[in-house]
Amino acid sequence: MNGNISTEILKRTIAYFYLLAYCPVDSITDFKDVTRPLIRQFAEDGRVREEEYLKEVIPEVSRRIVAYHEGTREPSQEYVEALIQAAGEADQSPEKVTTYQEVIARIAQLPQRAKPENRLHRKKGCSFCSLPCWYGYFTLISEPQFNVLQEMLETETRKPPAEQSPIYAVWGFALRHLHQITGSDETYIITPEHLKNMSYCLLLLAMAKSRRALPEEQLLTFQAAGRDQVQRLSVLATLSNHRSK
């Protein structure tokens, strides 16, 4: 790989490929438009032509993603090669991004990371997540600003009890984190289900860093509130689609 591509640029590119895994397949063209300035900046920083940048980094990005999910420095070449091929074509069409997301899903199910006892925050609530570690590596390498989350949660606790909604604070922080990565506040580049689970993973990582653990009952309540919110969003989307016809 080009020696001008720093570890920091590579980490940000890995985050980009996880966001590609969270993207609604029908929004891939919009996702590509939103993130084009991001790729252009990566290429400039790495002194690589923009049209060559992703080809240059995809092998190393794929190797690191598989290595994380297998819990090893020597990942299986079979999975690495499958991811290289799928990632290289992912932004070309809804069908291609679907294939890419299916490959990521298979890798995320590898037992070295997917089993509850092997998950990133296994002692702090990972067992309540509905997907096996799609988000752990993303939250680690994308450098969330947890002081912002702390401020948002403290603001929420100052409201009257009937008006408090910690889930909105955490979801709001997750969307702000996406904006920090992409430079765009467009929310359609992530599905509600992925937003729910990613928000939960960010909360767990924040707790791990602060060494404060929420009681299991509160984690379950947070997950239930997230599921309710996803259901409401799905109903609203269905109604909106029905009215537009």
Image (cartoon, helix red, strand yellow):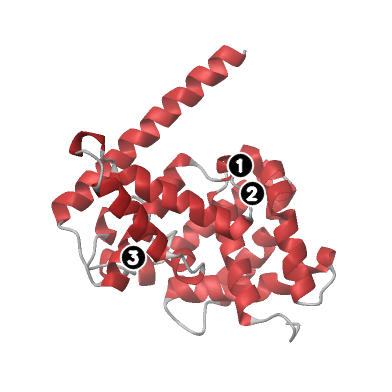
Amino acid carrying label 3: it is Ala
**Who's the residue at 61% across and 42% down the image?**
25
Front-lying residue, 2 or 102: 2
Q: Which quarter of the rendering shows the C terminus?
A: top right
**Who's the residue at 50% across and 71% down the image?**
141
Q: Are marks 1 and 2 in contact (CB under 8 Å)?
A: yes
Q: Is residue 91 left or right of residue 238?
A: right
Mark 1 sits on what residue? Answer: 25
Give residue 97's mark.
Answer: 2
Mark 1 residue crowding within 10 angstroms, few (<14) / some (14–19) / many (20+): many
Q: Is residue 60 left or right of residue 104?
A: right
Amino acid carrying label 1: it is Val
Relative image position of residue 206 (x, y in whole percent): 33, 65
Mark 3 sits on what residue? Answer: 206
Q: Which quarter of the rendering shows the N terminus?
A: bottom right
Relative image position of residue 14 (x, y in whole percent): 59, 67
